[in-house]
């Protein structure tokens, strides 16, 4: 057993419970639009089963053929915006997001070489729009919290824990941020990824 413990030396840490999660990768695309450094957002097609009409960054589920999360982000961006890999230059990973719903999202920031190369795939993307980075840096988002309630299953063994049914479980919340640009509302995970990016730029 001691040898097994010593054999853990040098292993890379994973996210606890990662094997139960569904992993996604997204790209926060930056490009020049009318001589302004801007961020691309997309409105998902209304025909999609998941998140129809939502404002998101390009991205999707990491597939078994993807060599790593970055490759998945590039692949999904190419599919959704009709680009080629050489049109995209990934700069850096942003912070990994782990949701309470067993969803793990690996975001990356990268450059798209030319706005004219962006052609939304109608099966997945209804439209794209661009927000100047200066606007996002100078205008703080609206902030609210969404609280999550703890609810135990019917046969939960309260007798095994201190204070039983009166145990003071911690309350959890998801911070919700909202940027409003023209008729578009950027919120949810997209806004949290954007906020992480802006915070890194302001350090």
Image (cartoon, rainbow, N blue to C red):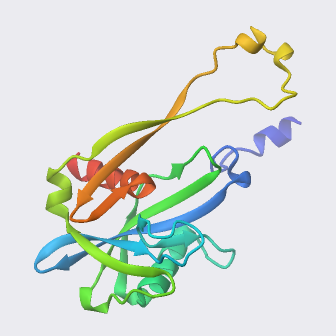
Instruction: Say if 6 sits above or below 35 in the image.
Output: above
Q: Residue at x 32, y 59 (%)?
A: 185
User: Residue 160 at what x, y percent from top left?
Assistant: 85, 16
User: Residue 76 at what x, y percent from top left?
Assistant: 51, 78
Instruction: Say if 15 sits above or below 34 in the image.
Output: above
Instruction: Say if 83 sits above or below 184 in the image.
Output: below
Does residue 24 appear left or right of residue 196 in this picture?
right
User: Residue 147 at what x, y percent from top left?
Assistant: 51, 33
Does residue 143 appear left or right of residue 74 in this picture?
left
User: Residue 159 at what x, y percent from top left?
Assistant: 85, 14
Q: Nearest the camera: 170 or 179?
A: 179
The part of the image, by quadrant, that contains residue 132 is bottom left
- In the rendered image, the quadrant that contains the N terminus is top right
The part of the image, by quadrant, that contains residue 137 is bottom left
Q: Residue at x 32, y 50 (%)?
A: 178
- In the rendered image, the quadrant that contains the C terminus is top left
Does residue 14 appear left or right of residue 116 in this picture?
right
Q: Residue at x 64, y 14 (%)?
A: 168
- Residue that extends furthest to the left in the rendered view of this protein: 35
Residue 114 appears in the picture as rendered: no
Q: Nearest the camera: 184 or 95?
A: 184
Residue 182 appears in the picture as rendered: yes
Count every numbered label the image shows and give the total: 0
Q: Residue at x 43, y 52 (%)?
A: 188
């Amino acid at each position: 057993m001691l040898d097994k413990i010593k054999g853990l030396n040098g292993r890379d840490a994973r996210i606890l419970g990662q094997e139960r999660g569904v992993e996604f990768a997204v790209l926060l695309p930056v490009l020049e639009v009318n001589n302004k450094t801007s961020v691309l957002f997309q409105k998902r097609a209304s025909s999609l089963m998941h998140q129809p009409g939502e404002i998101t960054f390009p991205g999707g589920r990491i597939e078994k053929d993807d060599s790593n999360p970055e490759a998945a982000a590039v692949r999904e961006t190419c599919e959704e915006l009709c680009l080629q890999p050489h049109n995209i230059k990934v700069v850096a990973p942003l912070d990994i997001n782990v949701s309470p719903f067993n969803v793990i999202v690996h975001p990356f920031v990268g450059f798209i070489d030319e706005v004219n190369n962006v052609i939304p795939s109608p099966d997945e993307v209804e439209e794209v729009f661009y927000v100047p980075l200066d606007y996002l840096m100078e205008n703080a988002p609206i902030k609210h919290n969404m609280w999550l309630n703890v609810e135990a299953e019917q046969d939960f063994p309260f007798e095994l824990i201190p204070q039983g049914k009166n145990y003071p479980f911690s309350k959890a919340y998801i911070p919700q941020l909202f940027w409003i640009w023209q008729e578009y509302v950027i919120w949810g995970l997209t806004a949290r990824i954007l906020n992480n990016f802006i915070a890194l730029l302001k350090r």
